[in-house]
Image (tube, rainbow, N blue to C red):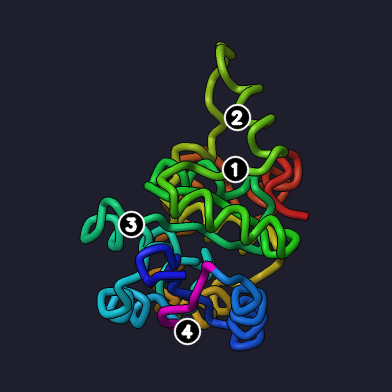
Amino acid sequence: MTDKATIRVFIADDHAIVREGLKQILAEQGDIVVAGEAENGLDAIKLFRKSRCHVVLLDISMPDRNGIEVLKQIKQERPDLAVLMLSMHREDQYAIRALKAGAAGYLTKQSAPRELVTAIRQVAGGQKYVSVTLAQALASQVGLDHDAPAHDSLSDREFQTLTMIASGKTVSDIARELSLSVKTVSEYRARLLAKMNLKNSAELTHYAIRNQLVE
């Protein structure tokens, strides 16, 4: 196979075990090679430029920058580049946000290796990739005349803060995990509560559970 026919993939995920697993899956494919990797959002932005890649596999939960923020930066520099988002979150939490931000597709990390390879080949060919489950969810929204849920008004970082609080994490936990200051996370919390007309974290958690935003 010529280099022209080979799909060059860049992997950005903060878990070394996940990166190794992805590389092992892709190494078994004759038409796909790993062109580079990064363990955080900042390195992903710096290193993908040197990789001459065709597809970026991007984790949505990076330790230093939200994956959707990284996605937007990559698309600003390479609008033609296919970015396939990977996440531990269910599709109904982040998929639509990722697609609106320019992602070519969205997969959960529970997806089968065969589906990952199919998705890479599809987005490398200029198409979008969504799972059957997500396609059904998107189709069910077409033509519906109803008010958007309150959480749709949140920024990507505010939405991430919502899901983390609803999962039982404190402001300090979130600040540490996202490499942000406690003050910054507190501001995100205050803004999302105001936007959603909620009074406290308990109401926020009830909302998230009622709307199936957390397990």
Q: Nearer the viewer, mark 4 or mark 1?
A: 1
The disc at residue 39 is 4
Measure how far apart labels 4 and 3 are at the Cα level: 20 Å
In the picture of the structure, the residue carrying the numbered disc 2 is 138
Residue at 75 percent across and 40 percent down: it is: 210
Which amino acid is tagged 3? Leu
Residue type for callout 4: Glu
> Outermost residue, left direction?
77
**Helix, strand or loop for disc 1:** loop
Q: Which residue is mark 1?
A: 130
Residue beneath the point at 68% across and 48% down: 213
Bounds of the magenta span? 31-38
Mark 3 Cα within 10 Å, few/some/many (few <14, many 20+)? many
Q: What is the distance, in whole Å, between disc 2 and disc 4 at their CAs? A: 31 Å
Mark 2 vs 1: CB contact within 8 A: yes
Front residue (pair 185, 90): 90
Q: Position of residue 98 (x, y in %)?
A: 47, 49
Of the two numbered discs 2 and 1 on the same chain, state the one appearing first in sequence: 1
Residue 161 coordinates in the image, percent (x, y): 53, 60
Q: How many marks?
A: 4
Q: Image quarter for residue 139?
A: top right
Query: Within the image, what quadrant is residue 114 found in?
Result: bottom right
Residue 194 visible in the displayed image: no
Rendered residue at 38%/47% (across/down): 101
N-terminal of the pair, mark 2 or mark 4, is 4
Q: Which label's residue is closer to the chain start, 4 or 3?
A: 4
Q: Earlier in the sequence, mark 1 or mark 3?
A: 3
